[in-house]
Image (cartoon, grey):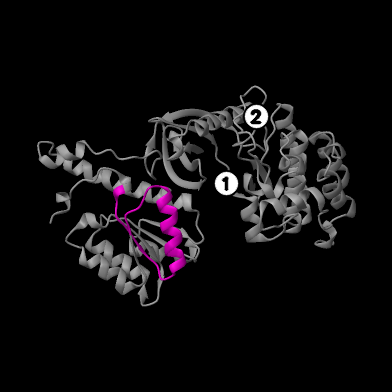
Amino acid sequence: MKETDTVPITQIGDSKILIIDDEPVILEIIKKFLSRYEFHNIATASSYKEGYGYFNTIIEKINTVDLIILDVVLPDGNGFELCKRIKTERPNIPVIMISGYEINRIYEKIVEAEADDFLVKPFDGVELAMRVNLHLHKKFSEHNNLLTMGDESEAAQNVNSINIKRNCPYIGEAVNNYIVIDSLGWSKASAVYKVVDKETHKLFAMKIIVFPTAEQGEMMERFAMERDLIARCNHPHIISFHEKGTWGNVPYMIMEYFESIDLEEYLVSHGKMAYKPFCKVALQLADALTHIHQNNIIHRDIKLKNILFNPEICDIKIADFGIAKHPDFTSLTRTGYVMGTPMYMPPEVFAGDKATLSSDIYSFGATMYHLVTGVPPYVADRASDLANHHRDTEPSPITLFRDDIPVALGNFIVQECMAKNPDNRPNSMKDVEERLKELTI
């Protein structure tokens, strides 16, 4: 059978995916992730022999397997060798390799194996689904182009009727005036890419709605709100807005590209931040929040993950306004639905009260507590227990974790910024900023 003789499928979700991994838990997790995005035609194998045997039995029916997810380490063989073997025999089948090793340690082997993509364990399920979707779409798009070159054929007529669902671009694709050159992250609602302007060659970040969210009106409204709120801000420690646009029916926004990692990633890779850079980061964040509040915006989700950090220049930028609120915009919060991240959420928001500027002050304090101590102020298995801690429990003193942090600074963060009663917190982020200057400079 020739590669161009394959029977076209009606949608990406019908694709056959083969997962090869020797850990049953990983196999089930991947299947669960993919099923959420309507990938249900999934086969599994737990070894080199079983995986290649499955692949080999269907080798004459190329459409039976459309994409392979392959673990680097297998109990009876080398995942790289298996990938190379598959790509040699059927180069059109995308292979996504997964491993607990960082990519910089095995990059050359990935290239030699001709893998199409690579993910480090533990990976985000949304990111996995996005990458599967992108590789499948790219595969079938290229295949369709080959078939339609001779559009008199019956196969070409069948291909013209294919409805492939795709709401985000793949690497190397043009989105209007921008070329996508790398992925920067995924969430349940959107993907963020590194892009380059075709004319100026300047780098930007592009945030775009992803499937299936693109069909949900509320998330589209929230995305538009976030875009407009970012555009209102002009501050050195807030990611700047460049322009907005649409790709097909999907909205995107182009923002400043900032070479960085988020503070959560920094904490995991470097440990708790040293005193001097911590003071600088705290002041930068306070100054940025002062600007946000002066624009009558309540951020509502201050946390380590939403703050980008460049360690070389010790500079931060707030990068996400996904649930921020402004009185000029209609509230999208459902009744009884709490907005924010529980680890940093003030007790009044847990209790169902509306977030205020004072709520951001509490979240600022909880975030800085986590950064300087290396642990969040409270930990619990259930959200209800976490809410009780925020309401009733005093966080452990920062000096219990650090002997280089002035007592007055630690007390300010815990006893004032994180005060249970909003009335006992500083009156504004500007006041927080001024106090920090007094305590750290």
> Which residue ends up furthest to the bottom in the rendered image?
76
Circle 2 crowding by C-alpha within 10 Å: few under 14, some 14–19, many from 20 = some
Vertical comparison of 253 with 372: above or below: above
User: In this orientation, does residue 395 appear?
Assistant: yes
Choose between 400 and 310: the one closer to the eye.
Answer: 400
Q: Earlier in the sequence, mark 1 or mark 2?
A: 2
User: What amino acid is found at the position of numbered circle 1 in the picture?
Assistant: Glu
Mark number, residue 233: 2
> Which residue ends up furthest to the top in the rendered image?
328
Task: Mark 1 vs mark 2: give the one in front.
Answer: 2
Q: Residue at x 81, y 39 (%)?
A: 433
Q: Is residue 24 magenta?
A: yes
Circle 1 crowding by C-alpha within 10 Å: few under 14, some 14–19, many from 20 = few
- The x and y percentages for residue 83 are 32, 65
Q: Residue at x 70, y 26 (%)?
A: 295
Circle 1 residue: 259
Q: Residue at x 82, y 57 (%)?
A: 398
The span shown in magenta is 14-42
User: What amino acid is found at the position of numbered circle 2 in the picture?
Assistant: Cys
Vertical comparison of 373 with 71: above or below: above
